[in-house]
Image: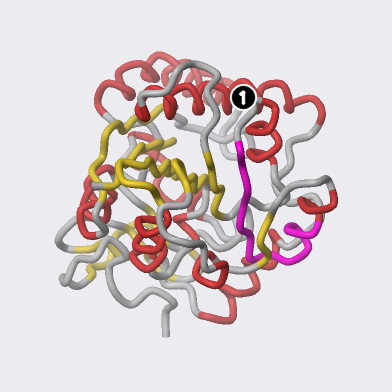
Amino acid sequence: MPVVTSCPAGCAAGFRETDIALPEGPLLACTACGHLVSQIEEIDYLAALDKFDTEAGTLPNPLSQKRHDQRARRLFARVRELLGLNPGASFRLLDVGCSSGALLLSAKKEGIDAEGVEPAQRAAEAARAVGLTVFAGTLQEARYPPDRFHVVTMMEVIEHLRQPIDVMKEIWNILVPGGILVIGTGNADSWTVSFMRERWDYFHMERYGGHISFFTPRSLERLAGQCGFRIERLETKRVRFAESFQAPPVVYRTLKIVAEVLNVPAMWCRKGHDLLAFLRKV
């Protein structure tokens, strides 16, 4: 039986098969909101998740650390703005699925009171080894008290969850009134998906272990409403129409140029394949 049997966005509708064919079967789409899910079975799903249980986790290499810190700084600036805080002000942050602590390290540099939760044991141990506060287990197992955090982040996590509603409701509980949840994931309603279909690497288990749930702006908004959140800001960016190993050099360069031209309109139309949403507890 597939790992996902009902719409992760909380719809009561059924699924239909799409024409996006993967090794585990065609992706399924919710007939109500268009959310896409994998047909992967339990044993293969668990094996794919093991990919993240390493000491290195998702830490950037030294060459990309500066760029990672810059992206995190922009993220924290948006959060402060939504919370009505002054630039540079501290707040309490929890990173759900923090891996070995890349975002937490950036947060510490910004003076933010940050901690994380991570179910992959070796990755959590690696984060604690460099002085980070990380609970090794699931969010529900951590049993944080209500109203503990001003901000919760889930970056490249929600696409791994069978039942994100349970996690979202727990996040609602531990956020202060008016607190902010930040979700980063792929956009299944992007121009990249429309063109590349099953060639988009985000869909593939062997490259991104454990991706089973693919959100659109519409399905994320539906999930937010089900769990007591309001979307304050949602943005998408980036278009990709080719992979270097899938197209001849001339074709690849041409498609890359076209994609770059479309990056700005993709942001305007919410058709970029990188989705970043800021949700407020209501």
At label 1, the amino acid type is Pro
Magenta-span inclusion, residue 233: no
* Outermost bottom residue: 1
Mark 1 burial class by Cα count in 10 Å: few <14, some 14-19, many 20+: few
For the point 31% across and 33% down, which residue is it? 234
Q: Position of residue 265 (x, y in %)?
A: 30, 18
- Does residue 44 sit above or below 269 in this rendering? below
For the point 69% across and 59% down, which residue is it? 52
**Nearest to the observer: residue 227 or residue 264:** 227
The local secondary structure at tag 1 comes to: helix
Magenta residues? Answer: 113-125
**Nearest to the observer: residue 77 or residue 163:** 77
For the point 58% across and 55% down, which residue is it? 97
How was this image coloured? secondary structure
Do we see residue 12 in this rendering?
Answer: yes
Do we see residue 184 in this rendering?
Answer: no
Magenta-span inclusion, residue 123: yes
- Does residue 214 sit above or below 59 in this rendering? below
**Nearest to the observer: residue 135 or residue 235:** 135
* Outermost right residue: 129
- Does residue 175 sit above or below 51 in this rendering? above
For mark 1, what is the residue? 249
**Quadrant housing residue 246:** top right
**Quadrant housing residue 238:** top left
